[in-house]
Structure formats: structure tokens, C-alpha cells
Amino acid sequence: MHGLASHVDSGPSHSPVRPARAAALTALGLFLLLLGTHWATMGHLVDRWSNDPQYSHGFIVPLFAAVVLWSRRAMLKQVAWTPTWIGCPFLAIGLAMRGVAAWIDFEALDTLSLLPSIFGLVLLVGGLSVLRWSWPALAFLGFMMPLPYFMETALALPLRRIATIMSTYALQTLGCPALSEGNVILVDDIPLGVEHACSGLGMLLTFFALATALAMVVNAPWHDRMVLIASAVPIAVLANVIRITATGLAYHLAGPDSELARLIYHDLAGWLMMPLALAMLWLELQFLAHLFIDQSDPAPLPLTMPKRSEFAIELPKTLPKEVKS
């Protein structure tokens, strides 16, 4: 028995990495299965990202999600792969959403069904521990989903009006004759229409995703992160106003047939607004970092009693002659 025990003990030990690798391979297989069953849905998403400028940021949302996961890689040491059947209800919810979307022909609901399905797969393969590590990145994937039409309309109308009023005021402040009529700005009798595509909704969605990703990875207090996310709205509005104002100035300086104005409005604006938003968010982080000073309670000063020898007064060993007499 002793020999048998020693033989068993000397056998190869099971590495703790093997369960994680097996779970990762299982997750990859289920993800490919999910991708296959939602292939038509993914096709609609890619088509929307390619043809709708308001959702062109959808291509980079998965990259941002990967960055969020990478920023939380230190938590992997504490992650335990413990599959749980709790993921099945999430998968059932995703399946029900797809069924309702197909019944009422609601494309936005069909794309949204991807989120509970992905959450269900993570729970089914990795359990609650893996979900605690990955949930910010999974929730961030919601930014690649197009909004329903009624929400787009409800947001675009006030955004167009705000952009029109602020751009008209900015042009007038810069000495350019401008007048707004509805959602049209007259610059030297040249109509500059703030159409649906120019409402700034695309910038709002993009900057919201960017600010959320930055808030997830930056090392800052939670209240600074909330302010950073909320600031996506004014930053998007300001960026759109800068875009429209620059176009109006180009029309004013170069005339109605200006190629420069079209270049600013359609090409340069799309490339420059993202660096501008990053610069604004960075300046906001610097401002928040210097706005409040961390005040820690100072420790009490140590009290040291002086020694008795410090109070002693040394008398001279020899007194002066006057004192002796």
C-alpha cells in the first residue's frame, strides 16, 4: 500500500490553469455559436455602422471594450472559473427578445438581445466571479447598438435647435452676419441647414462612449468619473457648434461655392472632432484633479517631556572675586 501511495503521489499534478483554459475554449465555442445564430443581426449592425455616420463609432466599441478588460487584468488573479446555471435565464431573455423583435419587426430590439445573451454565456461558462471582472466591458458593448427611431427623433430635434441657436450667436460674436430661421442659418443670405445628420447626435453617442471608456480605465475618484461621463453631453454640443461655426465662417469668407466649407463640414469635422473631444476630456480631468485638495486628518504631534537636566542651571565652579568678598 505504501508503494501504491507513493506511486499515486508522484503522478502528474493537475495545473490550476487547466480549468481556465478549458472554460476559455468552451466560451470561444459558444461565442462562435452565438455569432452564427445572430449572423443576420451582426450584418444589420455592420451595415448601419458603415452607412449611418451617427453610428460609425460602432466599429471601435469592441476595441474600447477590450481596453477596459485589459485595464482590469489585475483582477484575473482572483477570478475563479465556476460555471453556473444562472446564465440560462439570461439566454432565455435574449431568445425571447429576438422572438418579439421578429414578431413586431423591431430591429433595435433584435440587436439589443445580444447583451443578455452575452451575459448569459459568461455566467454559463465562467460564473459570477468572471462576470464581476468582465461586466464593465460587456455593458460597454451597448454603445454599438443603434437607438430606436423614436429615441433618435426625440434627441435629434432639441439638439438641432440648440446647435442652430448657439452657432448663430457664435457667428454674430465673430462679426459674421448670421440669422437663424428654424433650423437654417442664413450667412450672407447663404442658407446653412442644420439637418438631421448635423444635429450632433452622432457626436453625442461617440463622446458618451469615449467618456465612459475613459472613466472606466482612469485612476480617479468615483465622483470625478461620474462628472466625466455627464460632461459628454456639453462636449458633444460644443464640438458640433464649433463645426457649424467653422463652416459658416468658410462660407462667409470664401463664398457660397466654397469647397473649403464642404471640406470642413463633411471631412475635416469627422476627423478633428475626436481629437478635440479627447483634448477636452483631458483638460477636464486635469481641472478635476486640481479642483479639490485631499485633506487627510493630521496625526497629533508627539509630546516629549523635557528631561530634568534640561531645566538645571549650571553654576560656575569659581565665583568672581567681588562675590567672594
Image (cartoon, rainbow, N blue to C red):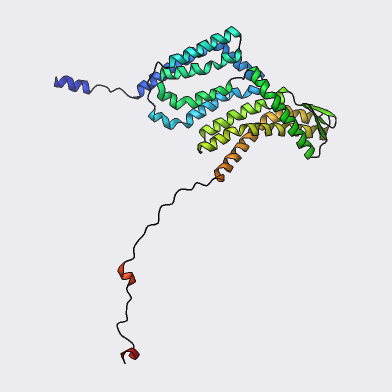
- The image shows residue 307, relative to residue 227, as above or below, that is below
Q: How many marks?
A: 0
User: Where is residue 301 shown, x and y percent of the image?
Assistant: 40, 56
Q: Can residue 195 be spotted in the picture?
A: yes
User: Where is residue 311 shown, x and y percent of the image?
Assistant: 33, 71
Residue in the picture at 33% in, 89% down: 323
Q: Is residue 182 left or right of residue 235?
A: right
Q: Which quadrant does the N terminus fall into? A: top left
Q: Can residue 25 be spotted in the picture?
A: no
Q: Which quadrant does the C terminus fall into? A: bottom left
Please tell me in which quadrant of the rendered image residue 288 appears: top right
Q: Is residue 172 left or right of residue 112?
A: right
Q: Residue furthest right?
A: 189
- The image shows residue 188, relative to residue 101, as above or below, that is below
Residue situated in front as seen by the camera: 192 or 57: 192
Q: Residue furthest top?
A: 103
Residue in the picture at 43% in, 19% down: 123
Residue in the picture at 72% in, 30% down: 163
Please tell me in which quadrant of the rendered image residue 289 appears: top right
User: Where is residue 283 shown, x and y percent of the image?
Assistant: 60, 40
Q: Residue furthest bottom?
A: 325
User: Where is residue 258 shown, x and y percent of the image?
Assistant: 81, 29
Please tell me in which quadrant of the rendered image residue 148 appears: top right
